[in-house]
Every structure is written in structure tokens, then in C-alpha cells.
Amino acid sequence: MFQPSGDVLIAQITSRFEVLTHAPTLALLGGVLLALMIAWGVAWLLGRQSDSTVNPALVQLFDRRIRAWLLMYVILALGFILGRGATTFLFFCVSFFALREFITITPTRQGDHRALFWVFFVFAPLQYLLIFAGPLLSGLDEILVGPGPYLHGLYSILLPVYAFLFVFTRVALAGDPRRFLERTAKIQAALLICVYALSFAPALLYLDLYRHNSATGQWERWEGSTAGLLFYFILIVQLADMFQFAGSKMLGGVPIAEDISSSRTWRGILFSLAMTSLCATGLWWVTPFTWWQSACLSMVVSALAFAGGMTMSAIKRDRGVKDYGTLVEGHAGILDRIDSLCFAAPVFFHLTRYFFMVLPMAQIGE
Amino acid sequence: MNLTSTLLAFAAKVLSGAQARWIDCQPDTCQRVYFANHTSHLDPLVIWGSLPYDVREVTRPVAAKDYWSRGPIKPFLARSFNALLIDRKKIKVHQSPIELMINEIGNRFSLIVFPEGGRVPEPGMREFKSGIYYLSKKRPDLELVPVYIENLNRVLPRGEFLPVPLLSCIKFGAPIWLEEGESKVDFLTRAREAVLNLKEL
């Protein structure tokens, strides 16, 4: 009841993650790599053209974006090869650096110092540790750890409840009442966006999913790889970002909120919704979804990617910086890359968990 | 220059995300006095760590003797950074701090000094003490390099011992020299302005 045997434990830790044995995941990884290489080649060719034929600033932007994607791809692929724990650790590092950028541009007072120390060195690691440690506790009573992914209940509230209350208390204990609510809200926003929201991306890896077999009308265990699902999700978010930018540029129109983002237009967003769902329809085979489920989910993801981009733009405009990357010269702006990911991750996670795990389990149980 | 100092400087750099920016100034092993705003205990460590290896070897931070001789660890740290310890309390007539500095640097070493005489949180900056004036009066050949330290006081503020790993920046500005006939007040104001000007860049 309390301790699973070693074999079961190992199976729990590695199950439904294996990238190298799941053909669709490998195919997707290979396909994306090929596309990136082709895009890189095109960027290189464009860079050699004379300035009169193409806009050099646009080419440079394109080239930089491709390089950033390639870097992301390599890091992610490396994480996948090393395993589920390594990928989770990777996301922790991203959260940590994003948090660092966020707090750096946010004015804090000395009274916030101790609270910030807890945020960086206790709460951020603990959130990822809970996600990682779930399967290790799978032998414990279900009542204690809840239905899978294990510790889901705890890591769903650790930051937005316990850590938030802790931040209030710790800042109050520091004895500086000036702008108390404003200061605590800033720290909490940083935790929520950079750590909590993003942590749901690697949490996808720990889902135990089911797919609906239309032939038999029954739910059955999904034999795919959750690493593929995570990759699918990140790919959709990146595509949504790209289509938003391209759609807003090509179709024009009035900016939605000019003071916040001068480039995003309604036409661009609609274009992104349509194109992203079209792409996702063609990628259903790597996920437990059917083609239309994949299209619907990708529309939600696309809309949230837009929400994330707008929110982070608003924060940047308020602080008077254009990119987080230019904040301190030479530092890559991680926040610029993950803003849309952060907003989409929790919703994608919960939709997937509810419709492809909780619901099927309940129906099978009946 | 030893393992302790190299490791510590590296750790401080990683922790503070310190980025060295050389504005109108390039790293060089010529004799210099780096003068900076003082906001945190990490300041000398991070400035020293952001210098290239060969420059580091000939650069010595100036520190307060009363503080850095206390306990077993601080003197050890001071030694490993080859720090030049100055007695703030008992300034003797025959052995003034300036003479001590000039003797110690010879014609090889550079110095890192904090002319505010203590740590001041960032927005404000105290008036400079006169040390750098007398130093450059006796050694007019020394290049005085203004250094602005940004955000480091948020990494490790005064009175705290646990750091928060924010991003910070170290800016090196164009060297200044004592002009002929320049008064002490004028020079110190100009030096302070040189540091403050870097803030906006």
C-alpha cells in the first residue's frame, strides 16, 4: 500500500515519456528541425541579398528569431533525451531567469529583500520539486496525494495561496508600510507569471492520458509520449506568436491598444487563430486528441498566447523598457520568449487533464 | 590572485548577473584608480571580477582596516584579494593613508576605491571624501576611472547577508585627471559628476 516495488517505481517515473520509442514524437521533432534549418538557410540567403531588394531590418529580425528558436529547440531536445526530470529542471531554470528579469525591472524596497529571497530560493524550486516528486509518492495512499498527476492538488495552490500569504506576512514583518499592497502585488505577479503559470508546461509530462477510440466508442490508454505533447504545445504557442506578428503586419488594421502594443491588430489575432488551428489540425497525430479537438485547443492556446503577449507588453510599457533583453546589455530576454507560453500553459494543462484524464477515468470507473 | 578570490569573484558575478560595460574606456593594465559609488558589500568583488584576468592581477581594492581585520574570515578574504587596508580611525601624521597607498602601489598596481567612505543605497550618493584628490595630486599620472554600479544594492543591501540574484551592471567611464590649478572642491564635484553621468548611459 505504501511502497511500490522498484520496478513499478521506475515504470511510474519513466512511463509515457519515452521520446525515442514514440514514432510520431520523433517525426514531429525531426520535421520541426528540418523546417528550422530551411528557414535558417532562407535567412542566410536573404542576408546576402542587396539592401534594395529586401528590408535589412526585417531580415535581421527574422534571422534573430530563427536563431532563438534553434537554441530553444536544441535545449528542449536535450532535455527530452535526458528525461522527464531533466526537462522539468530545465523549465525551473527558465522560470528562475525570467523571475530575475521581472524583479529587476520592478522597483522594490529594502523591506522586500527577505521576501524576495524566499521567492527565489524556496518557493520557485519547491513548485518544480512538487511536480517532479509526484510519481515518487505514487505508492502512498491516494487520499493523501490525490488522483494523478500526484501532488496536483498541492502544486496547484502552493504559490497562489500559501506563497502569496507568506509574501504578505514577510513584507509586513520587515516593518516598512509604505506602498505595502503595491509592493506585495508586484512580487506576487512575478511569482504567478514567471513560476506558477510556466510550471504547468512541464507538469504536462506527468499526465496519464486517455484517448477516445471512435471505432469501439471506448476510452483507452493513450500510448503516446507526453514529451511529444509538450513539444506540440510549445510549437502551437510559437506558431500563434508568429502568425499574430505576420497577420498584423500583412493585413494591417487599427491596433487593439496602441499605447500597449503598436503592432497587434484584431485582424492579426483572427488570422493567428485561423492559421494556428489549421496547423494544429494537421498535428493531431502526436497527441491524444482527434483533429477537431486539436483545432479547438489550439484556438484557446492562440488566444491565450495573445493575452500573455499583451499583458507583458503592458508591464514593459509601464516600466519604460521595450524588450526585457535590452534591459541589461548582453542578457537574453527570456521573458520576451516565454510571455505567451506562461499564459497558455495552465489553461492547456487543465483542459487536457480534465477532458483526457479525469473525465475518461470517471467514465471507465462507472 | 588565488583560487579563493577567483571563485568568489565568479560566484558574485553569477549571482549578481553583473555585466561589465566599458563606455569610452577600455580595460588596460596601466596604473589606474577605479572610483565607484558604494552600495553593497559585493561592490569590490564584482568590480574586481569584471576586469579581465591580466588587469585583475594588478588591481587591489582599498578597504577599511577596522572592518576587515575583525574575526577569522575577513582578514583571510582581504588577503586573498590582495586588499589594501586603510585605517579609518587613527590617521597618523607621518603615515597618512595616501602615502600608504602610494607606497603600496609602486609603479605596478591599480586601486579600487569608494570615495563616499561608506555604503549608501543607490538613488542617493554622498559627497566624495578628499582621498582621490590628494592621491592624484601626488601621482598626477594615475588614470582616474569613474565606475557606476547599478542595482547591486538590491542584490545584497546593507544589513542583509542573503543575496537575491537580480541583474546588475557595472559601467566604466572615460578616465579623468586632476587639472592644473583645479581646487579640491571643484575636482571632487567633477569626479562625483563623472560617476553620476554614467547612470543615464
Image (cartoon, coloured by chain):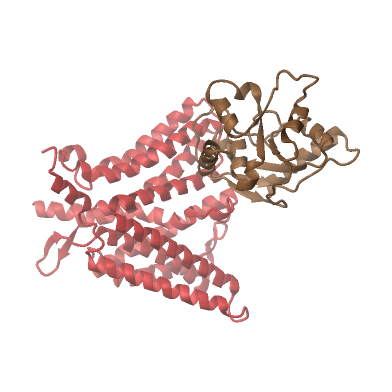
Chain colours: A red, B brown
Residue A258 locus on image (x, y percent): 56, 60
Asked if residue A88 is positioned above or below residue A119 in the image, the reply reads below
Question: Residue at image x 54%, y 40%?
Answer: B6
Front residue of A302/B92: it is B92
Q: In the rendered image, which quarter contains the N terminus of chain A? A: top left
Total number of numbered labels? 0
- Which residue ends up furthest to the right in the rendered image? B181
Front residue of A117/A241: it is A117
Question: Residue at image x 43%, y 57%?
Answer: A340
Asked if residue A313 is positioned above or below residue A242 in the image, the reply reads above
User: Relative to residue A103, is residue A299 drawn left or right?
Assistant: left
Q: Quadrant of residue B109?
A: top right
Camera sees residue B68? yes
User: Relative to residue A349, is residue A190 drawn left or right?
Assistant: right
Question: Residue at image x 33%, y 39%?
Answer: A158
Camera sees residue A292? no
Residue A93 locus on image (x, y percent): 41, 48
Question: Residue at image x 61%, y 23%?
Answer: B67
Asked if residue A88 is positioned above or below residue A42 in the image, the reply reads above
Asked if residue B106 is positioned above or below residue A315 in the image, the reply reads above
Front residue of A131/B39: it is B39
User: Relative to residue A319, is residue A4 drawn left or right?
Assistant: left
Residue B201 locus on image (x, y percent): 68, 50
Q: Quadrant of residue A297?
A: bottom left
Residue A118 locus on image (x, y percent): 43, 34
